[in-house]
Image (cartoon, rainbow, N blue to C red):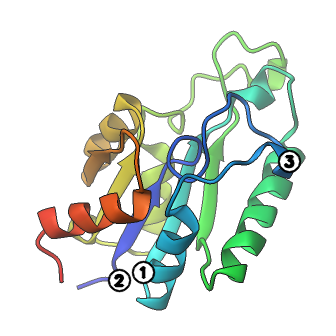
């Protein structure tokens, strides 16, 4: 058995989706998010964030802004005893305002590119991974990558994660 991994969408699962969140002062954590990352880290899980970031393609913020926010998020998770193993993001969008991001890529969810990249890079067996997302495109990307996807519709995400693990019959 490979190491177990969880994939999380960012906006709507880790933080409230206020639309194009790009700075720490715009982050409002979903209840249970920091605790979930800490618990999974203590248990030795690999934790990945897979997030569409079309705000880059729209010229609203830069890739450097996205990377800085992800570093800040990991600093916040560390305060609770957790760590995201790696953040994957897709800055692309067809007909983008910023031409270099006007790409029909394989990483933009519902396509599975970010998930497949992480599975391959970290040698994770598909049966040892699952995803929690807040949209159908997240779940579709998971299914296309060959892993289970669960739709989070609100509440405490740590409690929801426990339900997912029980549903997978993992102890």
Foreground tag (2 vs 3): 3
Q: For numbered disc 1, what is the local secondary structure?
A: loop
Callout count: 3
Q: Is residue 22 above or below residue 60?
A: below
Disc ID at residue 69: none
Q: Are marks 2 and 3 in contact (CB under 8 Å)?
A: no
Residue 75 position within the rendered picture, expressed as x and y whole percent measured from the top left = 77, 73
| Lower position in the chain sequence, tag 2 or tag 3 | 2
Which residue carries the number 1 mark? 45
Query: Which image quarter: residue 1?
Result: bottom left
Disc ID at residue 25: 3
Which residue is painted at 75% across and 28% down in the image? 55
Residue 8 position within the rendered picture, expressed as x and y whole percent measured from the top left = 47, 55
Q: Is residue 26 above or below residue 131?
A: above
Q: Are marks 2 and 1 in contact (CB under 8 Å)?
A: yes
Which residue is painted at 46% across and 81% down in the image? 39
Which residue carries the number 2 mark? 3
Callout 3: 10 Å neighbours few (<14), some, many (20+)? few
Residue 20 position within the rendered picture, expressed as x and y whole percent measured from the top left = 73, 30
Q: Residue furthest top?
A: 95
Q: CA distance from mark 2 to mark 3?
A: 34 Å
Q: CA distance from mark 2 to mark 1?
A: 7 Å
Foreground tag (1 vs 3): 3
Query: Which image quarter: residue 53?
Result: top right
Q: Is residue 140 above or below residue 89?
A: above
Q: CA distance from mark 1 to mark 3?
A: 28 Å
Q: Nearer the viewer, residue 171 or 53?
A: 171
Q: For numbered disc 2, what is the local secondary structure?
A: loop
Q: Nearer the viewer, residue 140 or 171?
A: 171
Which residue is painted at 40% across and 38% down in the image? 138
């Amino acid at each position: 058995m490979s190491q177990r991994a969880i994939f999380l969408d960012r906006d709507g699962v880790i933080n409230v989706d206020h639309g194009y969140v790009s700075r720490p002062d715009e982050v409002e954590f979903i209840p249970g998010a920091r605790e979930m990352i800490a618990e999974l880290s203590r248990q030795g899980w690999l934790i990945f964030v897979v997030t569409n970031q079309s705000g880059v393609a729209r010229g609203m913020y830069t890739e450097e802004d996205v990377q800085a926010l992800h570093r800040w998020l990991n600093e916040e998770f560390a305060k609770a005893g957790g760590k995201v193993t790696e953040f994957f993001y897709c800055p692309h969008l067809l007909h983008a305002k910023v031409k270099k991001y006007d790409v029909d890529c394989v990483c933009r969810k519902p396509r599975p590119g970010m998930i497949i990249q992480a599975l391959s890079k970290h040698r994770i067996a598909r049966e040892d991974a699952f995803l929690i997302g807040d949209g159908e495109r997240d779940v579709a990307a998971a299914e296309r990558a060959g892993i289970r996807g669960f739709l989070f519709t609100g509440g405490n995400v740590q409690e929801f994660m426990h339900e997912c693990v029980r549903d997978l019959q993992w102890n």
